[in-house]
Image (cartoon, grey):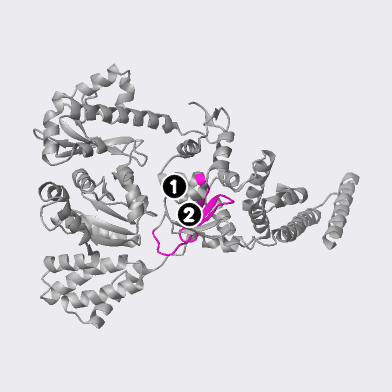
Amino acid sequence: MAGFISQETIEAVLATSDIVSLVGEYTKLTKRAGNDWWGCCPFHNEKTASFHVDGDKKFYYCFGCHASGDVIKFVMEIEKLSYADAIRLLAKRAGIEVTYSGGQLPKKSEDDGLKDELIDLYERTAGMFHYLLTQSDGGKSALAYITGRNIMIETIEKFKLGYAPADRRWLKSFLRAKNYSDSFLEKSGLFSKNYPDTSFFSDRLMFPIFNRVGKCVAFGGRLLNGDGPKYLNSGDLIQYKKGETLYAFNFAKSAIREEKKVIFCEGYMDCIAYHQCGITYAVAPLGTALTEEQLRIVRGFADTILLSFDSDKAGQEATKRAIYLCRKNNFTVKIIRLSVGKDPAEIMSKYGRETLTNDVKNAILDSAYLLSILGENYPVETSEGKLKASLEYFHYIDALQSDIQKESCLDELCQAFNLKPEAVKRDFQNRDGARKRLQIRQPAADHNSEILLNAEVRAVLAVIADLDQYKVMRAELTSSDFENPFAKKLFIILEECFRENTVSIGSILNRADDEETGRLITSVISSGEFSQQSGLIVQDCIKLIKRNALERKRTALMNRIRLFHGATPSDQEQLEKMLKEKMDLDSALKQ
């Protein structure tokens, strides 16, 4: 599969992909007029729809976070794929054969080949571990352990649980026999760096970690016998970044989309317990704390997050950090407080499905949870304790995105600790750094309104909004007529597309080499600024651009004339030519 994905494949993907149908799998879209669709943005959490999908021009634009692009860009961003992988996914979806050529862009990433090979290795290894758990004598004790915790065979099959043999040299020998080279296996993350023949995982119950499309990309392993850390996890790899991955998301995403909520729980076993109890919108972070990237995965699917972490001090701290992060990202947050047992896995095993289901139904709002925890952690019967608890609670209020929510939570604080509202509000507003934390940042893309005042940019954007106008523009102008570098860049992109007979919004966005260009294009078209009388706008702008080009030419010529000091007959002849050219320019400018 050497070389580059051919331009023909890219154009076929852009032409055949239904962006409305695709985006609709990630967020609910509502038709407003023609083939215009609107919904809540899948890239940032919001309550009011600001995400626009143009089914005819095949692009999307969010008026909230300014995410924008064509169907390929959408798949790249939403699925965290490379450009090449996004094209291959869309091609497979549309039944298009991917072809390659030696000189067409985009170039396949140097890591793409290794990434594909590693995913293949991990898929094969996961299958082998699963076989050892379920079919081999060596895996009997591990199978007895997991079934002893009331995990059903169907669940073991679904999550492809496995067993890594106690012999730490077995895996290397097995993979060598399958024709994997030592140099490749050294890059796999499956073996010790210091002892390359020694497996990283041994005598452990194995939990394959899947990517969004269900391919194994990493492992977690639970110790069964002897000394060592209870859990070992794969480190970051080319195909796997733990801070950008959620365990079981491939199984949970359809339920999350349907329920509009997601449970974040402590680890593999808790997540599996939720799924076995029919609560299939549960996932688990794979790091020590929830990350922005992990929240981004569920944007567009869910508006409510339920946190199900341990109730000990470490679990409380993890819960508080997660609350602040989720609230800053505008999610509604609830906390699952377990009625019995130390974790969901124990409840599922000892008390059954109904108990765990009821605990989920009885989840409380994060504000009530925090006030309860603060009341336990501080002596709130004293003025000093009340102050400390209030100052900590202010961190939560800072994270809220609504003034009404802030006001309501301040009232709840007063009621919980018997405080006077006036005193609480004064302390809240007078804290050091409060103004800075509450300041709302101006979106970076807002400076586009200044760019739009430039006639050159307006002309090219009007043409992009109505591509039939490009023949008119190219008959009157060349790239040298443009002074604005951004307008010149867009004109050159249009000309390249025209010469290759691929003039479309998708092709233009595909050739734009930075996000700001794509964002501006989709923003302006979505605004409808050029939806009417685009031909008249283009004609007026062409006249102005041509006039500006003439004036620039005249100004440059006048400067040459002023600086001219020639005295020879040849110099005099050159001066007369410049004066004649000035007269022609003056005449043209009067027309």
Q: Would residue 354 be seen by someone viewing this image from the given angle?
A: yes
For marks 2 and 1, the one nearer the N-term is 2
Instruction: Residue at 71%, 52% (x, y): give it.
Output: 469
**Camera-side residue: 207 or 294?**
207
Q: Which mark is residue 200?
A: none
Q: Is residue 179 magenta?
A: no
Horizontal side, residue 23 vs residue 430: left or right: right
Please give the label number shown on residue 77: 1
Residue 150: percent from the left, percent from the top?
A: 13, 42
The reply to whether the C-beta atoms of the residues labelled 2 and 1 are less than 8 Å apart is yes
Which residues are the magenta region?
Answer: 45-71
Q: Dot 2, crowdedness within 10 Å: few (<14), some or many (≥20)?
A: many
- Residue drawn at 18 percent across, 70 percent down: 389
Residue 210 x/y as whole percent? 31, 39
Q: How many marks?
A: 2
Q: Considering only vertical position in the picture, is 182 above or below 436? A: above
Residue 577 sits above or below residue 499 on the image:
below
**Quadrant including the C terminus:** bottom right
Q: Residue furthest left?
A: 226
Callout 1 secondary element: helix
Q: Is residue 228 visible?
A: no
Secondary structure under the numbered disc 2 in the rendered image: loop
Magenta run includes residue 56: yes
Q: Which residue is mark 2?
A: 67
In the picture, measured across the screen, residue 342 lies left or right of residue 470, that is left
In three-dimensional space, the C-alpha distance between marks 2 and 1, rounded to whole angstroms, equals: 9 Å
Q: Is residue 143 above or below residue 380?
A: above
Amino acid type, callout 2:
Ala
